[in-house]
Image: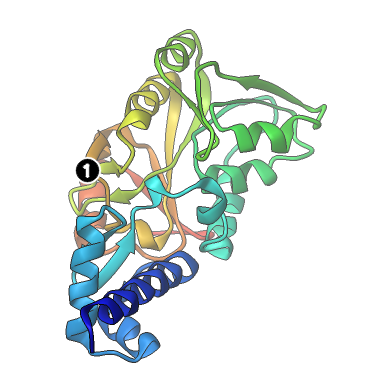
Amino acid sequence: MTSSVQAVLAERRHQLILRALRSGGPASVTDLSEQLGVSPATIRRDLVKLEEDGLLTRVHGGAVLEEGDQPFAEVAEVRVAEKDAIAQRAAAMVRDGQSVLLDIGTTAYRLARQLHGRRLTVITSNLVVYEELADDEGIELVLLGGMVRREYRSLVGFLTEDNLRQLHADWLFLGTSGVRPGGQVMDTTVVEVPVKRAMIKAGEKVVLLADAAKFPGHGMAKVCGPEELDVVVTNEPVDTATRASLQEARVEVVVAGKVQA
């Protein structure tokens, strides 16, 4: 087989691997090997190349996409049922008349969909949240200023941070790229981190929205430690190490309608 043909086949495998991760979330080497009909060794080489290109992150036994670098529209189609379960539980925490600060990301957007018909103030840098709630007359909607990141549907920069320093919200619902076993909240997109930190300072109660794929998830930039969280809402029981770290920091862990002791 010529090198040019091998290169074409490798490129095709890379496309299929990325498509599989986008549609199904994290995947193991074994699963990808079976789906593509090639050896695990070939998949491992492909994952090394894709990680070198910054398109995914290798984890033990498999890989995950760098979701923070994916366009919003692609991430919005992944794990929708899990995000909706989290959003429904998070929405039940909020009482009418309260103020809610919503982070960027697709889980915050799913939460916004649960807030229709409520009497609330919603503050956000998430353009999709703004579009979702713009016509709901019962909601006082505050859109933060800043520089637009078009593909990620968010506002960032010093204007966004300055706006947040002038505001206070009863609730912050925070998104993440991953949660380390020590309870550290991580993000893949460095430019979003200062905004998230400013949101934490502006929120009375800080609630992390994180589906099971975010444990451990990924991300190179630390947003905060567990001591800055009040609640974590997820859709499956948290792994033992992370749960112990959260408990030590007195963080309540809520799992899709039930509370872990």
Instruction: Specify the quadrant of the image occupied by residue 141.
Output: top right
Q: What x and y, as percent, mark residue 172?
A: 48, 31
Looking at the image, which is closer to me, 137 or 256? 137
Q: Residue at x 53, y 46 (%)?
A: 72
Q: What type is the residue that disc 1 sits on?
A: Met
Residue designated by label 1: 220
Can the viewer see residue 149 in this picture? Answer: yes
Q: What x and y, as percent, mark residue 157?
A: 41, 19
Looking at the image, which is closer to me, 45 or 116? 45
Q: Quadrant of the C terminus?
A: bottom left
From the viewer's perspective, tell me whether residue 163 is left or right of residue 158: right
Q: Residue at x 22, y 43 (%)?
A: 220
Looking at the image, which is closer to me, 97 or 187? 187
From the viewer's perspective, tell me whether residue 134 is left or right of residue 42: right
Q: Residue at x 34, y 90 (%)?
A: 34
Can the viewer see residue 261 in this picture? Answer: no
Q: Quadrant of the N terminus?
A: bottom left
Instruction: Specify the quadrant of the image occupied by residue 165.
Output: top left
Q: Is residue 219 above or below residue 158?
A: below
Q: Is residue 15 above or below residue 218?
A: below
Q: What x and y, as percent, mark residue 55?
A: 31, 56
From the viewer's perspective, tell me whether residue 29 is left or right of residue 117: left
The 10 Å Cα crowd at callout 1, few under 14, some 14 to 19, many 20 or more, is few
Q: What x and y, as percent, mark residue 222?
A: 23, 37
> Which SS class for mark 1?
loop
